[in-house]
Image: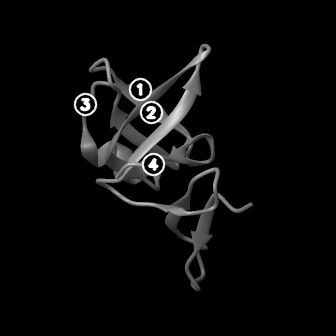
Amino acid sequence: MPTAKAAKSDKAEVTEVFAKDGQPIHEGQKVWSRARGGRQEGVVEKIFLTEEDIAKAGDLGVSVKHPPKVIYTDQHGHKVSHNPTTLTHSEEE
């Protein structure tokens, strides 16, 4: 299953990221991930596709390395950064 789709260009630039269920992830969608016997869920705040995007964003309150990454605040108020393929869309959106 692809994690990102490349545009038809010389650089093979990432333009979109996909969740574990194969659906594209967009800002504002509710997603969740398994974590330590439970789950972390929240609304997507930002999606970083390149190192340049991360550098431009400055301090995010969470460590972001090796894009693409999806940033959201979980139900406990903690900012989290995950690879898109570890996330699943929530049923209630």
**Image colouring:** one colour
Q: Amino acid at mark 2?
A: Ser
From the top left corner, tell me how far across and down residue 74 is, in percent: 35, 27
The label on residue 81 is 2
Rendered view: 78 above or below 55: above
Q: Nearer the viewer, mark 2 or mark 4?
A: 2
The label on residue 92 is none
From the top left corner, tell me how far across and down residue 2 is, in percent: 69, 62
Residue at disc 4, secondary structure: helix
Q: Residue drawn at (48%, 44%), measured in percent from left and top?
A: 69
How crowded pointer 3 is (Cα within 10 Å; few <14, some 14-19, many 20+) is rated as few
How crowded pointer 1 is (Cα within 10 Å; few <14, some 14-19, many 20+) is rated as few
Q: Nearer the viewer, mark 3 or mark 2?
A: 2
Q: Amino acid at mark 4?
A: Glu
Label 2 and label 4: CA atoms lie apart by 14 Å
The label on residue 59 is 3
The label on residue 51 is 4
Q: Residue drawn at (59%, 85%), measured in percent from left and top?
A: 8
Q: Quadrant of the N terminus?
A: bottom right
How crowded pointer 4 is (Cα within 10 Å; few <14, some 14-19, many 20+) is rated as few
Say whether residue 58 is left or right of residue 7: left
How crowded pointer 2 is (Cα within 10 Å; few <14, some 14-19, many 20+) is rated as many
Residue holding disc 1: 63
Circle 2/circle 1 CB separation < 8 Å = yes
